[in-house]
Amino acid sequence: MRKELIAPCGMNCCICLAYLREKNKCPGCRGSDKNKPITTAKCKIKTCSKLNSKFCYDCNDFPCDRLNHLDKRYRTKYHMSMIENLKFIQTNGIKQFLKQEEERWKCPDCGGVICCHNGICFSCGLEKLKDRKRLYRWED
Ligand SMILES: [Zn+2]
């Protein structure tokens, strides 16, 4: 995991479905907007005019309504928090954060990265899913 892949909002792009997938792969929030899903390219946090450093925590409005809203959605649906991520980076630095994230999202079976959006390891989990589908395709 690299620091360039940590978005201003505290999202770790390395564990995002759009970054991990093979088809229409997203280069990460800080990457080029070419080939990016429109919702990501137009993200109002990454293009926010109040953003005055690499991360939202340096903003006077931190955490703003927009970030709170996003954070709430992720806490509820994906068991992670952008705001917690940002506070951790602010206190412990980006290196420690990346180390923690690598451990947190590491697949226990192969050491690959587990996607926060669907909980699947993109190194070995996709193969397992395919196998499972084959296993249950009894109708033909
Ligand atoms: Zn795995």
Image: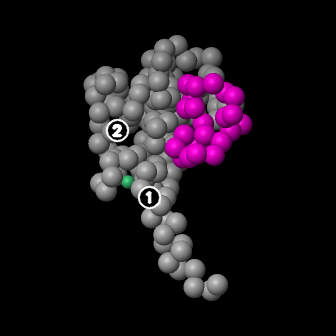
Most extreme residue toward the top is: 52
* Residue 125, disc: 1
The reply to whether residue 76 is in sight is no
**Residue 104 placement (x, y as % from top left):** 32, 45
Colouring convention used in this rendered image of the protein = one colour
Could you tell me which residue is drawn at 52 percent across and 13 percent down? 52
Tell me if residue 41 comes above or below residue 55 in the rendering: below
| Along the line of sight, the residue nearer the viewer: 102 or 78 | 102
Q: Is residue 70 left or right of residue 87?
A: right
Total marks drawn? Answer: 2
Disc 2, SS: helix
The quadrant in which the N terminus is found is top left
Which residue in the structure is indicated by mark 2?
Answer: 101
**Residue 85 placement (x, y as % from top left):** 39, 34
Magenta stretch, main secondary structure, is: loop
**Residue 76 placement (x, y as % from top left):** 47, 53
Which quadrant of the picture is home to ligand 1?
A: bottom left
Could you tell me which residue is drawn at 54 percent across and 40 percent down? 19
Segment tinted magenta in the rendering: 17-39
The reply to whether residue 80 is in sight is yes
| Magenta-colored stretch includes residue 21 | yes
Tell me if residue 40 comes above or below residue 21 in the rendering: above
Q: Amino acid at mark 2?
A: Glu
Disc 1, SS: helix
Q: Earlier in the sequence, mark 1 or mark 2?
A: 2
Tell me if residue 4 comes above or below residue 120 in the rendering: above
Q: Amino acid at mark 1?
A: Gly
Which numbered disc, 1 or 2, marks the residue closer to the eye? Answer: 1
Spatial CA distance of label 1 from label 2 is 19 Å
